[in-house]
């Protein structure tokens, strides 16, 4: 698994959609397509949402167009990318070729960005479990998991209905599904966490910050007629605390929380949804 942080400088001031993850996703696919069409196709067709994309993070001005904002010439902007694909090295290499070794421009419909910094970290499921085990051993039950849901998080419950609250069962069940779909086949038995939604609901308590809690309706795709397809989600800072949980459950939950930094939470993560930051606090 990889996490890539891009720092961008706009070439001028120009408008971008308020929810720009969908547009950024298209620009990234286009850049990948110029480098490796197979990788671009793999990312686009992946059933597991193997690429997470935060969209543009930074400070913006208002714009006269509805549902748009304006990038500021002298500001810098960040894009957080996560690669949870089992073939992450190929995806990472294509991203590096596109934004470091080849053309360092990310082009949008109304303007371009220059890529000024490209930083990455990598890990594995085994290493995440080892990190989680060390945290549990060091702090026992006296630690909290603080999750900042930075971009609208859309967790599918049933049909087209998405949850509008960082409920422990919804959030960690979503992460468990992603974990199970990305572990290497040859190590599936060893790395399977074998947990249920009931385990999360019984052993965790969530405390969202009311001052940061917001709900959103975000563009995730367009239909054949060009009409926007919207999904509902939330952003907030939320603290998860354990309640009489066993060491095994605390380790598994902590590993899933660390995993979310790479895989995102919920659906449509490649289109700007579900980007999170995680801190483990005593």
Image: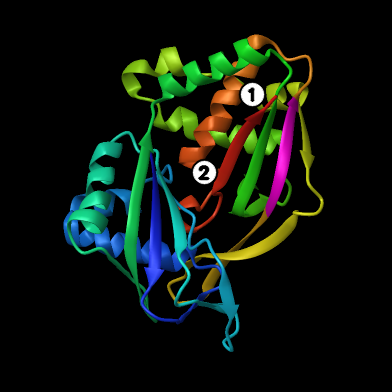
Residue at the location (69% across, 21% down)? 199
Q: Is residue 268 magenta?
A: no
Residue 148 in percent (x, y) is at 64, 45
Q: CA distance from mark 1 to mark 2?
A: 19 Å
State which quarter of the image contains the C terminus: top right
| Residue under pointer 1 | 196
Whether residue 252 sits left or right of residue 140 in the image: it is: left
| Residue under pointer 2 | 264
In front here: 47 or 103? Answer: 103
Name above or below for residue 268 compared with residue 277.
below
- Disc 1 on helix, strand or loop? loop
Q: Is residue 240 magenta?
A: yes
Q: Are marks 1 and 2 in contact (CB under 8 Å)?
A: no
Residue closest to the far bottom: 64
Q: Earlier in the sequence, mark 1 or mark 2?
A: 1
Residue at the location (50% across, 32% down)? 259
Residue 75 in percent (x, y) is at 48, 70
In front here: 175 or 143? Answer: 143
Residue 89, labelled with which disc?
Answer: none
């Amino acid at each position: 698994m990889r996490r890539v942080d891009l720092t961008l400088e706009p070439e001028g001031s120009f408008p971008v959609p308020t929810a720009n993850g969908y547009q950024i996703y298209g620009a990234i696919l286009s850049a990948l397509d110029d480098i490796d069409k197979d990788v671009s196709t793999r990312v686009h067709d992946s059933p597991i949402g193997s690429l997470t994309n935060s969209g543009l993070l930074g400070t913006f001005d208002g714009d006269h167009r509805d549902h748009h904002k304006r990038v500021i010439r002298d500001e810098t902007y960040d894009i957080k990318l996560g690669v949870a694909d089992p073939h992450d090295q190929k995806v990472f290499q294509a991203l590096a070729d596109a934004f470091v070794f080849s053309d360092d421009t990310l082009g949008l419909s109304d303007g371009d960005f220059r890529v000024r910094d490209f930083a990455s970290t990598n890990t594995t499921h085994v290493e995440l479990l080892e990190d989680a085990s060390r945290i549990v051993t060091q702090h026992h039950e006296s630690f909290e998991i603080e999750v900042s849901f930075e971009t609208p998080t859309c967790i599918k419950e049933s049909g087209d209905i998405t949850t509008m609250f960082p409920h422990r069962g919804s959030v960690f069940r979503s992460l468990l599904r992603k974990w199970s779909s990305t572990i290497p086949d040859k190590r599936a038995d060893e790395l399977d966490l074998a947990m249920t939604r009931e385990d999360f609901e019984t052993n965790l308590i969530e405390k969202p910050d009311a001052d940061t809690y917001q709900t959103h309706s975000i563009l995730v795709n367009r239909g054949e007629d060009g009409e926007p397809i919207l999904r509902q989600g939330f952003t907030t800072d939320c603290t998860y605390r354990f309640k009489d949980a066993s060491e095994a459950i605390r380790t598994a939950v902590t590993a899933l929380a660390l995993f979310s930094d790479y895989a995102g939470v919920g659906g449509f993560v490649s289109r700007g949804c579900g980007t999170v930051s995680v801190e483990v606090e005593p």
